[in-house]
Amino acid sequence: MPAAQVENWEQVTFALDGFLSRPAAPRVGSGDLLQAQSVLEAELERDGFTYGDMPAPLAEAVVLRVGRLALRTAELRRLEQPPEPAEDALPRFSWPVDPVSVTSLFGYRWHPVTGVHRRHLGVDLAATQGQPIYTADKGVVLRAGHNGDHGLQVEVQHEGRWVTRYSHLSRVLVDPGEVLERGNAVGLAGETGLATGVHLHFELWRDGQPMDPLEALGDAEPPPEPVPAVARGPVSR
């Protein structure tokens, strides 16, 4: 990637850090943030195809901030929307990993393994091998075991017809029918199934329809980390 483009992305991350350091405010519409998020993802994808050699620390820094921008968008949506009837309101789930780092969002994307443009039915959260994965709320285990591309997966039924799924586990710690409390460990992080590395793929479903989990997860948003310095070596073309 040309040095000028590397510098441009570094400036983008610094600008995002400045924005994310301020509290969420309704004066910034969620639609504007969603558009900015889409533009960033499209530009990142385009540069990846064009150059193919964005410095890894910088790429990780950009992806991390895109995830945090998605969290801010979800937070603003909740501020903008009027209260819903209790039976229709989104639940307030807790994060299944700690610390939180969103590495891939809900929606259409180029699959990193197959190269196919398809819908991503959940969010990916950074994790380390063997890290405990926790249930987002109390519920009953519907399924626990291998499930195709998802590898080792646990599926939990919650009150209000909500279902959460935890995929690519290295080990399952629960059995079908087991009753769980919020924060109970359901398994250990891994990369079983169709995965490019260790992470948690987390899904939220209701009545057979996938939902964006960020709409229901807590507002935890860690402060942005400094952008790693990128060595200015010879520019590859």
Image (spheres, grey):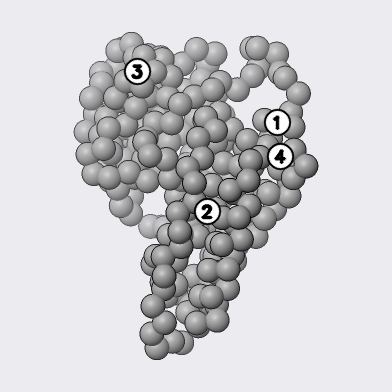
Q: Is residue 5 visible?
A: yes
What residue did someone put label 2 on?
Answer: 65
Whole-percent x and y of residue 210? 54, 32
Look at the numbered disc 3 and give the secondary structure of its residue.
Answer: strand
Residue mark closest to the camera, 3 vs 4? 4
For the residue pair 30 and 111, the one nearer the viewer reads as 30
**Is label 1 in contact with label 2 (beta carbons under 8 Å)?**
no
Q: Residue at x 30, y 52 (%)?
A: 197
Rendered position, 176 above or below 212: above
Q: Residue at x 33, y 50 (%)?
A: 195
Q: Residue at x 51, y 75 (%)?
A: 6
The residue tagged with tag 4: helix, strand or loop? loop
Marks 2 and 4 sit apart, C-alpha to C-alpha, by 18 Å
Q: Residues within 10 Å of mark 3 (few under 14, many from 20)?
A: many
| In this picture, residue 190 sits left or right of residue 125 | left
Q: Which residue is mark 3?
A: 141
Residue type (three-letter) at the residue carrying disc 2: Arg
Could you tell me how far apart the alpha carbons at marks 1 and 4 are, in whole angstroms?
Answer: 8 Å
Q: CA distance from mark 1 to mark 2?
A: 21 Å
Q: Earlier in the sequence, mark 1 or mark 4?
A: 4
Which residue carries the number 1 mark?
79
Give yes or no for contact between labels 1 and 3 (Cβ–Cβ under 8 Å): no
**Helix, strand or loop for disc 2:** helix
Marks 2 and 3, the one that precedes in the sequence: 2
Q: Where 80 sits versus 177, above or below?
A: below
Callout 4, which amino acid? Answer: Ala
Q: CA distance from mark 2 to mark 3?
A: 33 Å
**Mark whose residue sits in front, 2 or 4:** 4
Q: Determine which of the numbered discs, if any, sits on residue 25 in the image.
A: 4
